[in-house]
Image: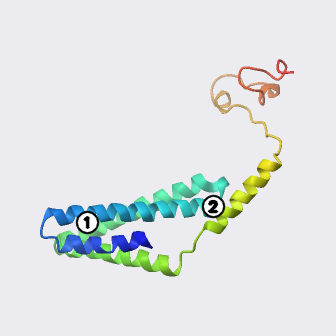
Amino acid sequence: MTGWLVGLPVPLLIIFAPSWGWVVFANVLLGINQGLCWSTTVIMMIDLVGPARRGLAMGLNEAAGYGALSLAAIAAGYLAATYALRPQPFLLGIGFALAGLLLSLFFVRESHGHARHEAAVLAQQARHPQPRRCRPPLFPLLSHKPPPSKTSSCSPPGRTARSSA
């Protein structure tokens, strides 16, 4: 919520900026907004998807974010070319900030419960470790070299299964 509240005045500061100092101050507020909102989004997404799908979630988050950014840039450029440099393109920013604030207020829920659950599961796994699954090294499988023997796939580096006994 704080990030969206900090971001609300940014478009207005730019629309009514009498000097570059106002624009610089608006960019400082925008940086705080992005730091709080984007970081919180990433943390909540990591909490919600769990350890197995974190990479996929981060990739989808980045793709959606930059996709939306490019569409907003196209829309702002169209508004600036059709109407004027100020205020029309920045009206989108007011809409985005209000939408983010309202969506966060009414629909976004805290993800602490998911993080606590994952921590409890990981703590239990640490108390009762499962046997390690053996996987052969990936590089030799994908290179032109012959695959490693199955007996050495779980040995520490530099040792084979026969020499470690």
**What residue is at 77 percent from the left and 48 percent from the top?**
126
Viewer-nearest residue: 114 or 89:
114
- Name the amino acid type tagged 2: Val
In this rendering, position of residue 141 left or right of residue 24: right
The C terminus is located in which quarter?
top right
Q: Which residue is mark 1?
A: 26
Residue at the left extreme, as displayed = 18
**What residue is at 31 percent from the left and 76 percent from the top?**
94
**What residue is at 45 percent from the left and 62 percent from the top?**
38
Viewer-nearest residue: 126 or 45:
126
In the picture, the disc for residue 107 is none
Q: Which residue is mark 2?
A: 49
> Residue 91 at what x, y percent from top left?
27, 76
The N terminus is located in which quarter?
bottom left
Residue at the top extreme, as displayed = 163
Viewer-nearest residue: 126 or 92:
126
Count of numbered circles in the view: 2
Tell me the crowding category of disc 2: few under 14, some 14 to 19, or many 20 or more residues within 10 angstroms, Cα based. Answer: some
The quarter of the displayed image where residue 139 is located = top right
In this rendering, position of residue 122 left or right of residue 109: right
The quarter of the displayed image where residue 2 is located = bottom left
Tell me the crowding category of disc 1: few under 14, some 14 to 19, or many 20 or more residues within 10 angstroms, Cα based. Answer: many
**What residue is at 51 percent from the left and 82 percent from the top?**
106
> Residue 65 at what x, y percent from top left?
43, 61
Label 1 – label 2 distance at C-alpha? 34 Å
In this rendering, position of residue 58 left or right of residue 21: right
Circles 1 and 2 in contact, beta carbons < 8 Å: no
Question: The residue tagged with tag 2: helix, strand or loop?
Answer: helix
- Name the amino acid type tagged 1: Ala
Please tell me whether residue 48 is drawn above or below residue 97 in the rendered image.
above
